[in-house]
Structures are given as C-alpha cells and as structure tokens.
Image (cartoon, grey):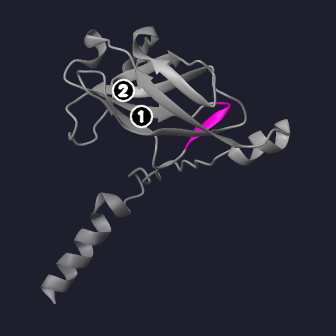
Amino acid sequence: MKILSAIIASVLLSPAFSATAPAPQPAPRVSLFSTSVDWAAVTGRPWQQYKGEISGRNRKLIKQGLVLYYLDAFPCYGEADSVRVWISPDGEMYGHLRLVCIAAPKTVSFAYRNAVQDALDARTDGILICPTDAERYFKIDLSKCEIGPKWTEYK
C-alpha cells in the first residue's frame, strides 16, 4: 500500500501534472502541395517534356565531382526520376535531366555539392543558376553557370 501511495503522489506532484508547468506545444504542421496543375490551367499552355544536357568544364566548380539536384521553378517541374545528375571531373554527365514545362526554360537552378559519383546524398551547399539555350533539347554550359547564395545566407 505504501508503494502505491508513493507512486500516486509522485505522479500528482510531477511537473507534467503541475498547474505551473507550461503545456507542451505541438510541432507546427507544414503542408507542401504542388501548384503544377494550375500552371497549365491558368496559362492555357500544354505540358511538354524537355531534356537537358550539361557540358563544359569548370574545374573550380566540379573538383572531384559535382552533384546537381534540379530545383523546380516556373515554367518547369522536374520528372521524379530525372532531377539528379553527377558531373565527373572530366565533364561527363551521369544521370538524366528531364523536365515537364509549359515553355522552354531560359535558366535552370540546381542545389549543388561536390562529391564523388557514388557518394550518399547529403546536404547541398547552395544554388547554382545556369542559363540554357531554351530549346526542347536544351544545353547547359557549366562555364556559364553562376554560384548563387549559400543556404546559410537565406533567412
């Protein structure tokens, strides 16, 4: 009986049940949703597939290899299996860049990081912004890409 009384007393006197203890706050909920259906609907333009090829040497940027992750932006969304590419130190592209767009992209943005080919995915460094030749089968020249802000610079 003494043990049962001690347990009940400790539960009732614990901070979780105290009137002065702050109530636990629920984690904020984040809801992500795609607006892609609206792009075609509100513009009246049909979706089309665009394919990108990355070339050009930029040893300062590539180093031991460069992993690029396409960042969705108007007028394009990346196809799920084709938004990650790896560029070798020799400038060879491994992976595919396929986008679904309502118009040919004039620029594309990537999250990037330096890594060897089979490295596990990890945090990226920032944004790489690249002009394209805005064709159905567009080309990206790495030597013309600009390094954008680092993620730590976003507030």
Left or right of 126 in this view: 40: right
Mark seen at residue 69: 1
Looking at this view, is 23 or 149 the one in front?
Answer: 149
User: For mark 2, what is the residue?
Assistant: 112
**Residue contact at pointers 2 and 1, CB within 8 angstroms:** yes
The residue located at (28%, 71%) in the rendering is 11
Q: CA distance from mark 2 to mark 1?
A: 6 Å
Residue 3's x, y, as percent? 14, 83
Which range of residues does the magenta coloring cover? 74-78
Looking at the rendered structure, the kind of residue marked 1 is: Tyr
Residue 91's x, y, as percent? 30, 22
Quarter of the N terminus within the rendering: bottom left
Q: Is residue 135 magenta?
A: no
In this rendering, the count of numbered labels is: 2
Looking at this view, is 90 or 124 the one in front?
Answer: 90
The residue located at (78%, 42%) in the rendering is 46
Q: Quadrant of residue 76?
A: top right
